Image (tube, helix red, strand yellow):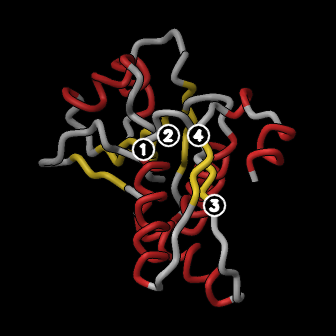
Amino acid sequence: MVTVLYFRHLGQYVNRMFLQGAQRFARMKGWNLRVIANDDCRSLDEIIDFWHPVGCILEDSSEDGDAYLRDSCALPVVAIDGRNVPGGKNRFRIMHDSVATGKFAAKELLALGFDRFAFVGFHRGGFWSAARESGFREALKLNGKCCLSFPERGRSEWKNEELVQWL
C-alpha cells in the first residue's frame, strides 16, 4: 500500500476541512494517509525512514519547522496554500483564487437584487482577504456599484455591536 504523510497544523477549522478532503481522496486511491502533527517531537528524517512514504502533503507552509519539507526533502511535496513553497521539481502548490471568490460573491449578491454593499475583512493581514475584497470591489464597479469596507480585525477582536453600528 502506498503511504503518504500529511503534516498538519492543529486547531484551525479550515485545516480540518483540508484533512477531511485528503482523507476522502486517500480512501478513493487506496492510500495509507499518515497524519503527523507539526509539533511532533520526532525528527522528520526518522518519520520518513519509518514510513517510507511516496510523498508528503503539507498544510500552510508558513511555519519554520516546515523549512525541511519546503526546501530539502527529496520526496514530492504538495503544499496546501503553498505561497511559501518555491516551485520546482517535486514541489507543488494548491492555491485558492481569492479574487475570483470575491467576484463570485459580488455576482451572487447582484443577482439577488441587492444594491448596497459592504465588505467585512476576515483576517487582519491575510493576503487572501485583501485579494477577495479587490475582486468584490472590481465586480461591483463593473456593474456601477460601490462598496464600504469594515476595518479588518482578528476573529477574536470582532464586536457585533460595533459592526451593527457601522452598518
Query: Which callout, 2 or 1, points at the residue further toward the start of the chain?
Result: 2
Q: Position of residue 66 (x, y in %)?
A: 36, 25
Report the Cα–Cα distance between label 3 and label 1. Answer: 36 Å
Q: Which residue is mark 4?
A: 151
- The amino acid beneath tag 3 is Ala
Up the image or down, 49 lies above or below 160; here it is above
Crowd band around label 1 with a 10 angstrom C-alpha radius: few (<14), some (14–19), many (20+): many
Residue 6, label in figure? 2
Q: Is residue 35 left or right of residue 70?
A: right
Q: Quadrant of residue 142?
A: bottom left
Mark 3 vs 1: CB contact within 8 A: no
- The amino acid beneath tag 1 is Ile
Up the image or down, 145 lies above or below 39; here it is below
Mark 4 vs 3: CB contact within 8 A: no
- Where disc 2 sits, the SS reads strand
Q: Quadrant of residue 4?
A: top left
Mark 1 vs 4: CB contact within 8 A: no
x 63%, y 31%: residue? 154
x 23%, y 46%: residue? 91
- Where disc 4 sits, the SS reads loop
Q: Position of residue 22 (x, y in %)?
A: 56, 55
Q: Which residue is mark 3?
A: 118
Q: Which mark is nearer the camera, 3 or 1?
A: 3
Query: Which callout, 1 or 4, points at the residue further toward the start of the chain?
Result: 1
Report the Cα–Cα distance between label 3 and label 2. Answer: 38 Å
- Where disc 1 sits, the SS reads strand
Q: Which residue is mark 1?
A: 57
Q: Is residue 46 left or right of residue 162?
A: left
Report the Cα–Cα distance between label 1 and label 4. Answer: 34 Å
